[in-house]
Image (cartoon, rainbow, N blue to C red):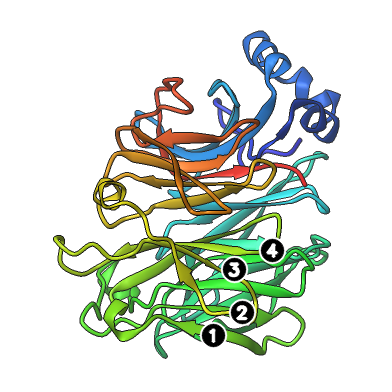
């Protein structure tokens, strides 16, 4: 298994898979590199995840973990990572720099190979998220054309060292997360609607006239298929993260940039050809989420939707069919969420992963390895 870097503390990248699939994919050579403690933890694991982290000494990296929250392996990164993506077809993993970062690192999971580092094109920076094509040959990344104040999707060729071979619009401002439709033909993009420019770091420049939207874009042509702009009353509701249910329904989560005492809807869903519908959460749940959903995940097998709010120190589980709240749990600095064997694995900025403490600060997302 290739490592992004080869420091003294190695880490590997992954999305959730079952242990047997992970070991088969990574190979005996990878398992042989593990310490006896890590190998024992992996042998007992039902599933394997990956999440970006910050170490106590301030260095950044990505860690592979078991479902019990035990770190199996580590790899250091040159700067803070945010979102990650995995290609089951290509057996490759990418970690994207946090906005307004300009690097992404791609590592092979099943063969010895040096990682590929790509840099955002001139006049662009990454927004921290992306995804692979269904066959793993292409990598799509959300990017900012900051001079023109428009979101773009950068297209990278995985068969040619991930050379940048094109781009097309997201048809919105400030794209963040995106997902690939089950048939592989459409990108579902959450355009947060917030204008930023690297000269001003992470400052939000247009909070009084935001333009949040959800767009569907054809992967073959880059053409707009559908655009769902939020109504004027919700123009300060930034559409940030998306995931897809077993039935193809798109779930999206939002972060509100308006007055703190407002109680806007924070999560919704839609299918191609229909307008988005917001979930009518109980007031206590909306208050608990503190107008900020930092991550969303769908457990397709169990028909559940998981939400986390680091600002609200809360993790919420919804029933996908009805939108009803199944569980509400207080987790200090709740960060990432991903489907687990049962329910969800939740991480925190304080180092907790599914309740297991670690001496790192997990970043905002967890990824699931395998297909």
Distance from Cα at disc 4 to Cα at disc 3: 21 Å
Disc 4: which residue = 248
Which residue is depicted at the point 31% across and 77% down? 234
**For mark 3, what is the residue?**
141
- Earlier in the chain: of badge 2 and badge 4, it is 2
Numbered disc 1: secondary structure: strand
Q: Vertically, is 264 above or below 296?
A: below
Specify which label sits upstream in the sequence, 3 or 1.
3
Q: Please report the residue visible at 25 percent of the width from the left and 81 percent of the height from the top.
A: 206
State the residue in front, 48 or 114: 48
**Residue 76, can we see it?**
no
Q: Secondary structure at mark 2?
A: strand
Q: CA distance from mark 2 to mark 3?
A: 15 Å
Tell me: 284 left or right of 48: left
Between marks 2 and 3 in the image, the one whose residue lies nearer the viewer: 2
Q: Residue 227 — which label?
A: 1
Residue linked to disc 2: 216
Q: Quadrant of residue 140?
A: bottom right
**Neighbour class for label 3 at 10 Å: few (<14), some, many (≥20)?**
many
Query: Up-down: is 91 above or below 53?
Result: below
The reply to whether discs 1 and 2 touch (Cβ–Cβ < 8 Å) is: yes
In this rendered view, identify the residue nearer to me: 214 or 70.
214
Element class at badge 4: loop
> How many residues crowd mark 4 within 10 Å: few (<14), some (14–19), many (20+)?
some
Residue at (27% x, 57% y) in the render: 291
Quarter residue 279 falls in:
bottom left
């Amino acid at each position: 298994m290739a490592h992004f870097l080869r420091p003294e503390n190695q880490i590997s990248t992954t999305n959730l898979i079952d242990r047997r699939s992970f070991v088969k994919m990574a190979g005996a050579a990878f398992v042989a590199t593990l310490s006896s403690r890590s190998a024992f933890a992996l042998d007992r694991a039902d599933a394997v995840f990956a999440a970006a982290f910050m170490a106590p000494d301030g260095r950044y990296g990505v860690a592979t973990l078991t479902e019990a929250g035990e770190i199996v392996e580590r790899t250091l990164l040159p700067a803070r990572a945010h979102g990650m993506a995995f290609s089951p077809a290509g057996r490759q993993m990418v970690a994207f720099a946090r906005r307004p970062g300009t690097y992404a690192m791609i590592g092979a999971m099943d063969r010895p190979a040096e990682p590929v580092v790509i840099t955002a094109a001139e006049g662009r920076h990454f927004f921290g998220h992306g995804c692979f094509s269904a066959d793993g040959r292409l990598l799509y990344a959300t990017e900012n054309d900051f001079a023109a104040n428009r979101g773009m999707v950068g297209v990278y060729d995985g068969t040619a060292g991930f050379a940048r071979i094109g781009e097309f619009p997201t048809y919105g401002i400030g794209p963040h997360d995106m997902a690939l439709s089950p048939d592989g033909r459409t990108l579902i993009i959450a355009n947060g609607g917030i204008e930023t420019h690297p000269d001003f770091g992470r400052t939000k420049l247009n909070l009084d006239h935001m333009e949040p939207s959800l767009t569907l874009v054809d992967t073959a042509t880059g053409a707009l298929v559908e655009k769902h702009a939020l109504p004027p009353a919700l123009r300060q509701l930034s559409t940030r993260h998306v995931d897809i249910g077993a039935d193809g329904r798109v779930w999206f989560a939002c972060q509100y940039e308006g007055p703190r005492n407002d109680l806007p809807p924070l999560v919704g869903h839609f299918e191609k050809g229909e307008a988005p519908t917001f979930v009518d959460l109980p007031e206590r749940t909306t208050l608990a989420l503190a107008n900020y959903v930092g991550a969303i995940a769908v457990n397709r097998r169990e028909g559940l939707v998981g939400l986390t709010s680091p600002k609200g120190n809360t993790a919420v589980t919804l029933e996908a069919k009805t939108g009803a709240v199944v569980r509400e749990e207080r987790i200090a600095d709740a960060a990432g969420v991903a489907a687990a064997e049962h329910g969800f694995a939740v991480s925190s900025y304080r180092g907790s992963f599914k309740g297991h403490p670690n001496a790192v600060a997990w970043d905002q997302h967890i990824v699931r390895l395998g297909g």
